[in-house]
Amino acid sequence: MDNLEHRIKKAIESNDKKTSFAGKEQMWSRLDSEMNGRKGVAAFWRIAAVFLGLLLTLGVVASLNNRAKQRAEMENVKHEITRLQLLVDSLQTVPAQVRTEVQVVEKEKVVYRDRVVEKDVPDETIKWQKNYEDAIDSMQALQNVNAAFKAEIQTLNEELLALKNHAASESTELPQSANPFELKSERVELGPQQKPSVKSPEMEMKVFQKNFIENRNNLNSTIFKK
Amino acid sequence: MQLEKVIHKVKKGDRRAQKLLFDKYVDRLFAVARRYAANDELAEDALFQAFMKIYTKLPEFEYINEPALVGWLTRIVINQTLMDRRKELSTLYKVETLDEERHETSWIEEMDDGALIDLVNELPDGYRTVFLMNAVDGYAHKEIAEVLGISESTSRSQFFKARKFLQKKLAQDYGQSGT
C-alpha cells in the first residue's frame, strides 16, 4: 500500500476512535421498540397460527366423526329397509285371511256414588285413589255380569227341566199309540181308474200346505177328523 | 461478559446482550457511516437500518474473533450507507474522468490527521467512496464493483483518479509533491 493511503487510513482509524455518537440512546430506544414490536407481532401470529391449527384439527376430527356417524346411520337404515322389504315379501306370499271378531258390549250402567275428594294431597295418593276407585268400579261391573249370568243359568236350568219333563211325558205316551198302522205287503189288482169317492164320511184326506210348519205329529187330529 | 457469549445471547434474542453489542460498536460504526454518507442525518438513518440488519442476520454469522466481527459489522454499515447512494454514485463514475498519473509523497507521514481527513473529504463523492472502500476498509475492487454496481475496471480507475486528485491537492496546498 502506498504511503499516502496508509497515512490516510491511520488518520481515519484514529478519528473513528474519537468519534462519539450523540444520538446513541435515542437510536437504541428506536431499535428496541422496533425489535420488540416485531417480536410482539411475531408472538401474536404464532399464537394465532397455533389457535387456527387447533381449530382446523378440531374441525377435521368433528367432520370425520360426523361422517362415521352418518355412515353408521345409513347402514342401520339400509338394514331396516332390507328387513322391511323381507317382511313385505313374506306378507305378500301369505294368503289373505278374514277374521271375524264378535264383540259383545254390555251396556254400562251409570253408577253415582258419593266420593270424598281431598285437596292438597300428593300426586301419588291421588293416583292410588284413582286406581282403587277403578278397581271398585271394575268389581261392581263384574258382579253385575255375574248376577246376569246366574239369572241366565237359572232360566236355562228351568227350561232344561221343562224340556226334560216334556220329554219324559212324551216317552210315557208313545207305547199306547205305538204302531197304529201296520204295513203289509199285498198284491193289488188295479182296475180302470175311477173317481175317488169317500166311502166313510168320518175319513177325509187332508192335503198339507207347502209351508206347513206345525211340528205336531198327532195323526189322529190331522188326518182323522176327530 | 465475553464477546462470544454476548454474540450467542444476541442470536437468541437477549435484549440485554443486544444493548451491550450496540453500546460497544455504535460509535465506531457511526464514524464508518458518516464517512460514506452525504451528511450526518443520512449516516444516522443508514446506521439504524444497518443495526436492524445486524440483529436480523447475526444468527447466520459465525463468531471467530473480534476483528472478523468488526469487519462484518463495518461492511454491513458501509453497504447500507451506500445502498441509497448507489444510483447517484454510478452516474458520477460515468461523468468524471482524470488522468492516471502516479505521484509518490514522502512527507505525508508528518501531516496532521485532521488535515488529511479534510483532504479526503474534499474528494468528489465517486472518488472518495472508492478510495475509502479500498484504502481504509480493505474492499477489493471486485467487491467495490459489486457493492456500487459498477465494473471492476471503473473501480480501479476511480481509485487511481482519487489518488491523483489527492496528490495534486497536496502539491497545491503544501507546495510539495514526490514521485
Image (spheres, grey):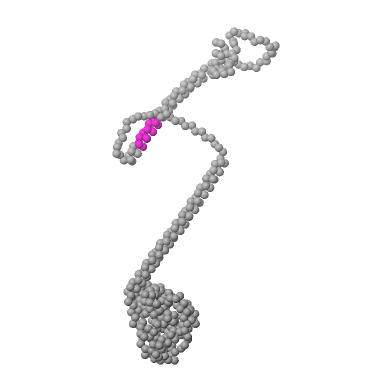
Using the image, determine if residue A200 lies above or below residue A56. above
Residue B64 can be seen in this image: no
Whether residue B122 is in magenta: the answer is: no
- Kindly identify the residue that appears in the image at 54 percent across and 45 percent down: A85
Where residue A138 appears, as percent x and y from the top left, is 39, 33
Tell which of A75 and A174 is nearer to you.
Answer: A75
Q: Is residue A150 above or below residue A29?
A: above
Q: Residue at x 32, y 32 (%)?
A: A115
Q: Residue at x 46, y 30 (%)?
A: A104
- How many marks the image carries: the answer is 0
Query: Can the viewer see residue A115 in this picture?
Result: yes
Foreground: A88 or B2?
B2
Q: Main secondary structure of the magenta part?
A: helix
In the rendered image, residue A139 lying in the magenta stretch gets the answer yes
Quadrant, the N terminus of chain B = bottom left
Residue A85, compared with residue A28, is above or below; it is above
Query: On the picture, is A187 further left or further right than B160?
Result: right
Nearer-the-camera pick, B20 or A95: B20
- x and y percentages locating residue A24 in the rendered image: 33, 75
In which quadrant will I find the C terminus of chain B?
A: bottom left
Name the one closer to the observer, A208 or A98: A98
Residue numbers of the magenta segment: A130-144
**Residue A143 location, x and y as percent?**
39, 30
Place residue A5 in its image quadrant: bottom left
Q: Position of residue B45 (x, y in %)?
A: 38, 74
